[in-house]
Image (cartoon, rainbow, N blue to C red):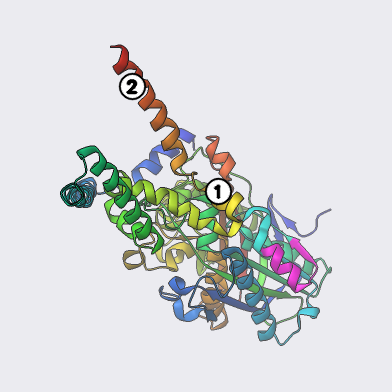
Amino acid sequence: MAVKKVGKQTVKFKNPPTVLSVASIVGPKEREGPLGNYFDKTVSDDIFNEKSWEKAESKFIKEAICLATKKALMNIQDIDYMLGGDLLNQLMSTNFAARDMQIPFYGLFSACSTLTESLGLGSKIIDGGYADYVVVSTASHFATAERQFRNPLELGNQRKLTAQWTVTGSGAAILSRKGHGPYITYVTTGKVIDLGINDVNNMGAAMAPAAVNTIVNHFKDTKSMPSDYDLIVTGDLGKIGREIAIELLEKENYKVEEDKFIDCGVEIFNHDCQDTHAGGSGAGCCAVVFCGYLFKQLVNKECNHILLVATGALLSTTSCQQGESIPSIAHAVSIKMVL
Amino acid sequence: MENDDYKGLVEDKKPKPNYIKNCLWAFLIGGLICTFGQVIHDYIEGKFALTHLEATNATTLVMIFIGALLTGIGVYDLIGKRAGAGSIIPITGFANSIVAPAMEFKREGYVLGVGSKMFTVAGPVLVYGITSSVIVGLIYYFV
């Protein structure tokens, strides 16, 4: 019998793993945003002295992992597993980073929700007794995402008001069996939800129902309420997706306070002057906001209990050209500073 | 929630673009590009003693060069952000749509990168533009 499973989609850890250390590294635009001072490292040029955007993204991942390891006073060899992914085909940048890191590696993809997918699986590996230390990392890069999913950078077209801006950056977190918090207490695995949105320029709207589905199931499984959390943080719904999610939650009879329901994509940029339209997005968005900002909020006891719900739009260039709608997913992890 | 109900909700939440402002920008920048083209045309026609048609062809070359240059130095996308169709429709926009992917995919090599990706944006315009011009030409010939 699955003794740690609660409800339909959730796992409750017997020995909640600790987030031992985190590191975040971002590009110049993210540095100029409202959370700029929270990030560990900023690069002045998105290309990061590499010969391609993809290699730059890979370097972001490596630097974040090395920095997180250093902050935990550990060596790369001490880490049992590396889990993570990015948005590129065949996880190019993460696979190349893993080639250089030489840590036993599981490459994961659930688009922008890969951070919480990795945190969830990493925690299960640790609580299951299969490892002492696991590093999770995700990344995204504006230039690599644009060339794979959208248009060449220099093309003189207009972006839609509902479009989002892919975050350039990477976040890494080391999970450990022992430590003094913040602890990962519950993980709720999401289902793929699709309400028929096929506008690739409005991914917040495509992902909002997936976020709501996972959040509602988390509340039901853990018998909790929105008021049990200091913050409920979604990944990259953006302004429009966040508004829709609040409305959908209300329809499900869960009233959330506006200032306690935040979105990493909304927080990371100053949308009025940074021209980011509906908000930030990408697998790196939730990663850098969690590893940069939220982790410090927890450690400094600004808040004690957060529900982190990264959201992913599982589209491909093939699927959208064939006119398919956008399937979406959201995974939730509940993180507590004091148990 | 049903898919149709949800689509309705999403439509309500979508911000509406400011069409009047966008049209004015497109008109202004598009108009400026065309006026500039006319100035070049008149200059070439007067200076080099070319026929009207020859001067038109030479103007096209100059405008394509300017569009490509502005793309190369990273200015055309900034113009396009404001002007929209105003800078896409003129021939400078066509140059931009070819140079931008050529620059973007240079790292994949000159054959499979630049060569094959150069027409990813402009390709459909060429296919349907040329096809429809042939059809219109045939209609004109027979009618």
Residue at 42%, 60% in the rendered image: A279
Residue A51's spot in the image, x, y percent?
59, 69
Residue B134's spot in the image, x, y percent?
38, 24
Which image quadrant: the C terminus of chain B?
A: top left
Left or right, B19 with respect to A307, comes to left
Does dot 2 land on a helix, a strand or a loop? helix
Residue A296's spot in the image, x, y percent?
54, 80
Q: Which residues lie in the magenta part?
A: A94-106
Residue B45's spot in the image, x, y percent?
18, 46
Of residues A335 and A3, the one drawn nearer to the viewer in this rendering = A335
Q: Is residue A222 above or below residue A50?
A: above
Does dot 1 land on a helix, a strand or a loop? helix
Residue holding disc 1: B115
Residue at 48%, 40% in the rendered image: A197
Q: Is residue A306 above or below residue B49?
A: below
**Badges 2 and 1: C-beta atoms under 8 Å apart?**
no
Left or right, A271 with respect to B109, comes to left
Residue holding disc 2: B137
Residue A235 visible somewhere in the drawing: no
What subunit carries mark 1? B
Task: Say which amino acid is labelled 2.
Answer: Gly
Is residue B4 on the magenta stretch? no
Residue sitting at the far top: B143
Q: How many marks?
A: 2
Q: Quadrant of residue A291?
A: bottom right
Compute the Cα span from label 2 to label 1: 30 Å
Of residues A152 and A309, the one drawn nearer to the viewer in this rendering = A152
Q: Quadrant of residue A266?
A: bottom left
Task: Say which amino acid is labelled 1.
Answer: Gly
Q: Quadrant of residue A154?
A: bottom left
Of residues A275 and B13, the one drawn nearer to the viewer in this rendering = A275
Left or right, A227 with respect to B70, comes to right
